[in-house]
């Protein structure tokens, strides 16, 4: 497991550096490798028969990998929609994975839900003026990722932070795509937050699996 996690960190760092340097071949190759490495780490850190949580998160990593790879085969709006579609499936699968942990999530504390709701509304309102016919897709995706983030708090602090960072990463993509906000080295910021979010979620799942194995 440690070897796969180490490889994930190295390949992720190389990817971000390639983004910053504008070296597209290296950036493209390394982006195709990161999710499989994280899946290998999750597999290596768990034993058979793997619980439902681990199996569903592995499926979420698969859809995330498809979101990283399928758009490269397309162009323009088709590439963007393919990315959104694949990551929407990933968020729905993650939400399904974390659903059994809902009793330990912030769902039991309605006041704490307000920042999540505010984040979803802010993303929608900021993107709406230029979204056009894609506005329904933005609404659905914003709702899905916020639900995922809320349910991920059932994994504990690490999972909750990881999911919140995932919301930030996807918000950066949306704000850039619809001309709201573009940071210096925007692509690198998107990938740093994305890679960190996925790593924290997987580490939280590994912790949960270890706790379950002791019970």
Image (cartoon, grey):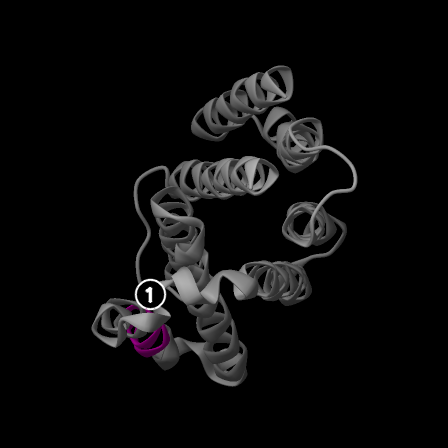
The residue nearer to you, when weighing 128 against 41, is 41
The residue carrying pointer 1 sits among few (fewer than 14), some (14 to 19) or many (20 or more) residues within 10 Å by Cα, namely some
**Residue located beneath label 1 in the image:** 106
Is 192 within the magenta?
A: no
Residue 171 spot, x, y in % from top left: 39, 59
Residue at screen point 78% across, 37% down: 48
- At x 40% / y 61%, what residue is drawn? 104
**Is 172 situated above or below 11?**
below
Q: Residue at x 48, y 81 (%)?
A: 135
User: Hey, which residue is sitting farthest left in the picture?
Assistant: 111
Q: Quadrant of residue 193?
A: top left
Query: Does 59 appear above or below 194?
Result: below
Is most of the magenta stretch helix, strand or loop? helix
| Quarter placement of the C terminus | top right
Please state which of residues 57 and 51 is positioned toward the viewer in this rendering: 51
Residue 209 in the image: x percent, y percent?
Answer: 58, 40
> Horizontal placement of 63 versus 169: left or right?
right
Secondary structure category for the residue under label 1: helix
Q: Residue at x 46, y 66 (%)?
A: 102
Viewer-closest of 20 and 100:
100
Residue 182 x/y as whole percent:
33, 51
Residues in magenta, as a range: 119-126
User: Residue 146 placed where, x, y %?
Assistant: 42, 67
Up/down of 96 relative to 6, above or below: below
Viewer-proximal residue, 172 or 154?
Answer: 154
- Left or right placement of residue 32 versus residue 168 in this view: right
């Amino acid at each position: 497991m440690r070897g796969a996690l180490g490889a994930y960190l190295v390949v992720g760092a190389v990817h971000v550096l390639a983004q910053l340097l504008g070296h597209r071949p290296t950036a493209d190759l390394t982006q195709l490798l990161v999710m499989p490495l994280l899946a290998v780490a999750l597999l290596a850190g768990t034993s058979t028969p793997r619980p439902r949580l681990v199996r569903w998160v592995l499926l979420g990593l698969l859809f995330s990998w498809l979101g990283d790879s399928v758009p490269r085969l397309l162009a323009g709006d088709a590439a963007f929609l393919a990315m959104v579609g694949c990551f929407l499936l990933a968020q729905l699968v993650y939400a399904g994975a974390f659903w059994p942990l809902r009793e330990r999530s912030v769902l039991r504390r309605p006041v704490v839900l307000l920042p999540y709701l505010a984040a979803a509304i802010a993303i929608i309102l900021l993107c709406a003026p230029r979204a056009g016919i894609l506005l329904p897709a933005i609404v659905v995706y914003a709702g899905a990722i916020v639900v995922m983030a809320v349910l991920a708090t059932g994994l504990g602090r690490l999972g909750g932070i990881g999911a919140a960072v995932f919301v930030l990463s996807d918000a950066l993509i949306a704000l850039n795509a619809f001309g709201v906000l573009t940071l210096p080295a925007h692509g690198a910021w998107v990938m740093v937050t994305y890679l960190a979010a996925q790593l924290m979620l997987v580490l939280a799942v590994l912790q949960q699996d270890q706790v379950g194995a002791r019970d």
